[in-house]
Image (spheres, coloured by chain):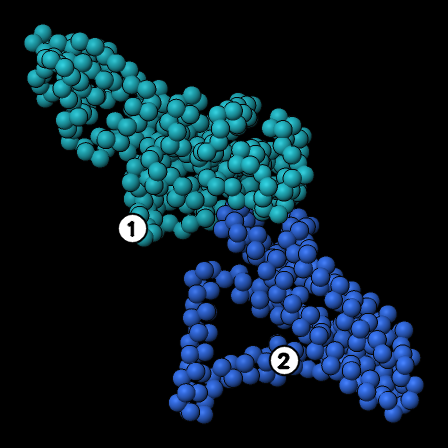
Amino acid sequence: MFRAILWSQWRESRLAMVVLAGMAVAVPLLSLRGAGAVTDPWASWDLLRATARWGAAYPVLALAAALALAAGAWWPDHRTKHVYALTLPVSRVRYLLLRYGAGLTLLFVIAAVLAVSTVVATIRVPLPTLLHAYPGGITVRFLLAGLSAYTILFGLMGLTPRMARLVAAVFLLVVLAALVADLASLGWNPLGSVVDALLGPYSPLAIFRARWMLIDV
Amino acid sequence: MTDAIQIRGLSYQVGGFALRDVNLSVPSGAVYGFLGPNGAGKTTTIRLLLGLLRPAGGSMKVFGEDVPKDIVSILGRVGYVPERPQLYPNLSIDEAIRFHAAFHPRYDQAASRDLAARFELPMKRALARLSKGEMGKVMILLALAQRPDLLVLDEPTDGLDPVVRREALHAILDYVTESGATVLISSHLVHELERFCDWIGVLDQGTIVAQLPMQEFKSGLKRLRVGAGAPSAGAPFALLARGAAGIGGEVWTVRGWQPDMASWFGEAHPLREVVDLDLEEAFVELLRSARHPSGREA
């Protein structure tokens, strides 16, 4: 069963998977493109700045992968109004876990590509003294970020239309409240509070705010 | 004979539509035609039976197991062809078959290949690119190859051309003859059901208005030509409709007719002719009488 679900999900998101895997190869290699020329230890600062600039690409990649895989997990069933899935002789919980697991497996594939790419990129570069490469760290972060985002998006995209409308209504209400508060100069920003709560230190999405450095001290 | 499907007091409501106190029994091994006009509630009843919707009241059993409590076990024995094809459009036919087979332990690969060859299906083509007829055949192939004990077919041939329809129905009949499976087939194409159903249930406006063996359904409904002004009080049959027919005559549509009832008409108002109604006429008259139970001028 799992293989069948995995195959159907691959068929649904293969184009996105290829693009994401291509990005997972390209980002580490491009981020260290000029690093081979760094011989002066004082130039390490420039290398760190360049790495930090590219660092923003990793969480974006994790979020894009999570979005594509969550959409790929649900899209076939949404399009068929869930009729086919619900008439398969398997419990709903099991079916849900199979779908979730298949998306997770595809996320691991992208993470594996990223792991290989970061290792290759860092092996090719002679690093100045005091600087170290963290291919494993970047891959684990990517995986954790991808996992958090995928889990949340999988849950959101799997909502019934009624629940989805409810979530959208709450979100619109928050945006509206923020707008009114801003116009009335109340000094209160509910949208900011929501974003802070979502990305705060205790949120599973906090990892998106962390420093993503392939090369660091 | 035990019932493969037993529905008691089923009710369901959504928007302005309601199913009210639906009672339905499909004997094991029967080919049960589920008739009704568009919007009568046939698809809703089927969806309730397959656990796709939650009923407001009543009970449903399939092979003695409760819906929705035992739905997983039930679905393992049911082949379902929905009104509109609901397969994943990005998969090819080949892939859709593999996907389906993975969930049905009794899936018969040899039968599947035979049916694919019989239907001349382009196995590598994506489902999204199939014609309506090809898609209908794929749905029937999947339902039959899983070797179900119960086939639930919701307007399976609706919109198909006559050639495809004939092929599909033959495949279904072959399977039923060979396996003895029970079939619940919903349709508003009355002629289609007439040929191979042995039971008939008629749903109208969310209510079952008739449920009986096909033979009984067909034989009891007649159109009578009688002399004008004949009294209908005390008739041994049910008068569904009556109307004038030319000079000095009337046409009566009746149910529950038996040949020996001809003597009931006296010489003053003689019975001139008894005409068999085909299933479609019978169906229309049945609906008419259900909607106007007192009988009326046609």
Distance from the alpha carbon under mark 1 to that under mark 2: 48 Å
Give the crowd class for mark 2: few <14, some 14-19, many >=20 residues within 10 Å: some
* Residue at disc 1, secondary structure: loop
Q: Residue at x 28, y 34 (%)?
A: B209
Query: Image quadrant of residue A170?
Result: bottom left
Q: Residue at x 89, y 73 (%)?
A: A123
Figure check: B220 above or below B289: above
B251 left or right of B135? left
- Kindly identify which chain the residue marked by label 1 belongs to: B
Asked whether B176 or B291 is in front, the reply is B291
Figure check: B279 above or below A199: above
Figure check: B94 above or below A39: above
Numbered badge on residue A206: 2
How far across and how far down the image is residue B123, in percent?
Answer: 66, 36
* Number of residue marks: 2
Identify the residue under disc 1: B16
Asked whether A87 or A157 is in front, the reply is A157
Give the crowd class for mark 1: few <14, some 14-19, many >=20 residues within 10 Å: few
Asked whether B255 or B118 is in front, the reply is B118
Q: Residue at x 85, y 83 (%)?
A: A132
Picture quarter with the C terminus of chain A? bottom right
Question: What type is the residue that disc 2 sits on?
Answer: Ala
Q: Residue at x 55, y 36 (%)?
A: B131
Which hue belongs to chain B? cyan
How far across and how far down the image is residue B46, in percent?
Answer: 42, 41
- Kindly identify which chain the residue marked by label 2 belongs to: A
The chain in blue: A
Residue B60 can be seen, yes or no = no
Question: What type is the residue that disc 1 sits on?
Answer: Gly
B211 left or right of B272? right
* Residue at disc 2, secondary structure: helix
